[in-house]
Image (tube, rainbow, N blue to C red):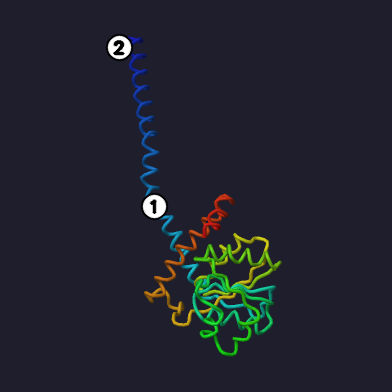
């Protein structure tokens, strides 16, 4: 028959064994959790990106110009004759006092532009339009527009560009001139409909590329101010 000392020793060994088993089970729990959570960690960013893209595309589908927009001046970002015509029509309707066409090729003159705009808008082109020839991209458009607006003391601008380009343009312009009120005036793309973008390869591809640029433009706004200013100056 075991002695009392032997029984006590056996009990201690049993307790140590049970403690080791509990510790082992506890040690396995985190690994089980991460194995279960890892697929979710991978999938969640994809879901967020896809949901963001759908919201972005639908925002462009629903984009409409305001019915009675008025401001101190207008800026149109070059890229198509329909944008310039749309901006000149606003000048003709006395919606603003002056217009900047930003991003004009340095070799293009007002006479060259007169050949591509509607005939009834050419007088407005001659009287009330400035040509900005320094911008090479949307970041440059923002810097060029800021300098032009500040030199003339404009406190509000109507922004004219293509519907798909408007979200990114507004981010860049607002970042460059936070104290100036901006009114978006999207112009539909004449040869491209976004209504059925999910089954139109051309529309889908354009929206996907623009969404990527839009995300980059958003991310840039979180950079230090001096970095953004240096980037804008370089453009």
The residue located at (36%, 34%) in the rendering is 25
Q: Nearer the viewer, residue 167 or 140?
A: 140
Q: Nearer the viewer, residue 63 or 33?
A: 63
Q: Nearer the viewer, residue 159 or 139?
A: 139
Q: Assess disc 2: are there few (<14), some (14-19) or many (≥20) residues with their C-alpha within 10 Å of its C-alpha.
A: few
Mark 2 to mark 1: distance in Å?
A: 59 Å
- Report the residue marked by disc 1: 42
131 vs 24: above or below = below
- Report the residue marked by disc 2: 2
Measuring from the top left, give residue 60's x and y in whole percent.
51, 73
In-image side of 70 versus 26 (left or right): right
220 vs 77: above or below = above
**Residue 78, disc:** none
Q: Nearer the viewer, residue 134 or 9?
A: 134
Find the residue positioned furthest to the left: 1
Measuring from the top left, give residue 227's x and y in whole percent.
55, 51
Q: Earlier in the sequence, mark 2 or mark 1?
A: 2
Find the residue positioned furthest to the bottom: 120
Q: Considering the numbered disc 2 on the image, is that residue within a helix, a strand or a loop? A: loop
Q: Quadrant where the N terminus lies?
A: top left
The residue located at (59%, 79%) in the rendering is 87
């Amino acid at each position: 028959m075991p002695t009392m000392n032997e029984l006590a020793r056996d009990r201690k060994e049993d307790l140590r064994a049970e403690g080791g088993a509990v510790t082992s089970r506890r040690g396995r729990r985190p690994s089980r959790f991460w194995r279960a959570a890892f697929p979710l960690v991978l999938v969640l960013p994809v879901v967020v990106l896809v949901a963001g893209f759908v919201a972005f595309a639908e925002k462009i589908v629903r984009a409409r110009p305001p019915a009675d927009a008025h401001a101190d001046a207008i800026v149109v970002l070059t890229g198509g004759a329909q944008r310039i015509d749309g901006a000149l029509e606003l000048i003709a309707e006395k919606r603003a006092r002056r217009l900047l066409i930003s991003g004009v090729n340095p070799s293009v003159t007002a006479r060259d532009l007169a050949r591509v705009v509607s005939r009834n808008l050419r007088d407005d082109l001659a009287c009330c339009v400035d040509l900005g020839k320094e911008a090479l991209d949307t970041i440059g458009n923002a810097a060029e527009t800021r300098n032009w607006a500040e030199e003339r003391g404009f406190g509000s601008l109507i922004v004219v560009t293509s519907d798909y380009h408007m979200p990114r343009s507004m981010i860049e312009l607002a970042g460059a001139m936070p104290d100036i009120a901006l009114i978006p005036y999207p112009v539909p793309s004449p040869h491209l409909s976004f209504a059925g973008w999910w089954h139109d390869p051309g529309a889908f591809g354009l929206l996907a590329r623009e969404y990527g640029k839009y995300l980059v433009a958003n991310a840039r706004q979180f950079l230090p101010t001096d970095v953004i200013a240096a980037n804008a100056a370089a453009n």
